[in-house]
Image: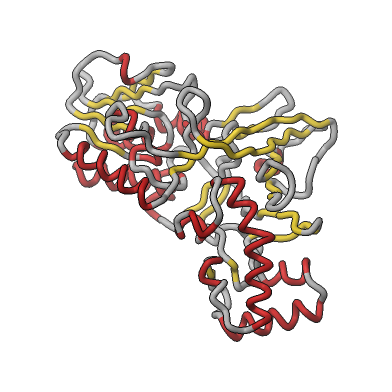
Amino acid sequence: MVKNLVVGAGFSGAAIANLIADKSDEKVLVIDKKEHIAGNSYDYTDENGIKIHKYGSHIFHTNNEKVWQFIKQFTDFNTYMHQVVAVIDGIETTIPFNINTLYDVFPHTLAKRLEEKLLKAFEYNSKVPILEFQKQADADLKFLAKYVYEKVFLHYTNKQWGNTPDEVDSAVTARVPVYISCDNRYFQDKYQGIPLYGYTKAVEKMLRHPNIEVKLNTDYKNLSGEFDRIFYTGSIDEFFDYKFGQLPYRSVNFKLETHDKEYYQCNSVVNYPCNYDFTRIHEYKYYLDDKSDKTVIAKEYSEAFEIGKNERYYPIPKEENIALYNKYLEEAKKLNNVYFLGRLGDYKYYNMDQAIERAIDLFEELK
């Protein structure tokens, strides 16, 4: 008899399924509405020999030793360290905005003066959220804060979230701070890279266990059978048939283009904060150094989530949305055998390592 049902075959579902199957030696059925495993981290090799991240660039990064040791059982990683380029006033420069960015976008004399004032006001290697950075008394730093806000945050946030930076939760704007450093890496985590054979292969190996059965193209609502425990990584409001209303999400539309050249742009990801309708362009062959005469890019357009039209990507962390989620959470507490996890189940903006950490913590709590 199958004791455990896992709804969703992304990192959250695959991790909890593997732990139950391997550590508890129990049978697990994993289902997913999609036609593939790995959720939004799904990747595939196209006809050009390029590994495509179907749902946008995914870079694994973590400082969590427990998570790193877990994921390393299923894949090896390259030593890729992610950097992001942004086009500001027609100049390609580094994001997050750092000391090197100063010298890219300003005349040398002004950049030098701003650097000296930044180092006097802030500790080196510190990260300052933009809304905090704006609270400067010094005239030069006020000018810099206004410049960064308008050129880096304002229009990009409007495109991605449909709101201005001060209208979204501070946890969102804090993800791309002003970085008082010359470190051009987007992440400073101890461990970072891309799985050598892709994310799908890693999740496939996670689910390849004699105690695990996987059924794709399978909707939880259409499933029959009894289970001792259900681990639900889908949207918590959908589970409860939207009885309190729909939780808002942002979605993303990726438009793929193949170009008959070795490279399209200078970097794996180039952001366009102030230009065009798309937020950024991904060029996938950078991640695993794929060799091809052609290259594939994806222009990323942010949009509101609509049921039946597109995918849920980002929970929108606003006070009223968290209050609505908490109403669903109270309903969930009344169920003694259903556990919610993952970005949709917990209505939290999880990175991949955080999704795995949540699954490990839940398993240890139940064990």
Residue placed at 56% from the left, 66% from the top?
Answer: 130
Q: Is residue 78 left or right of residue 86?
A: left
Height in image: 179 above or below 95? below
Height in image: 146 above or below 85? below
Q: Quadrant of residue 25?
A: top left
Image quarter hosting the C terminus: top left
Residue 10 x %, y %: 43, 33
Residue placed at 31% from the left, 32% from the top?
Answer: 232
Q: Nearer the viewer, residue 209 or 347?
A: 347
Image quarter hosting the N terminus: top left
Residue placed at 71% from the left, 55% from the top?
Answer: 86
Q: Is residue 287 visible?
A: yes
Height in image: 180 above or below 185? below
Residue placed at 55% from the left, 45% from the top?
Answer: 162
Q: Nearer the viewer, residue 155 or 287?
A: 155
Residue 112 x %, y %: 75, 81
Q: Nearer the viewer, residue 252 or 18?
A: 252
Height in image: 132 above or below 254? below
Q: Is residue 190 visible?
A: no
Q: Is residue 25 left or right of residue 48?
A: left
Give the tally of numbered discs: 0
The colour scheme used to paint the residues is secondary structure
Give the residue furthest to the right. 261
Q: Is residue 317 left or right of residue 26?
A: right
Residue 268 x %, y %: 69, 46
Q: Quadrant of residue 219?
A: top left
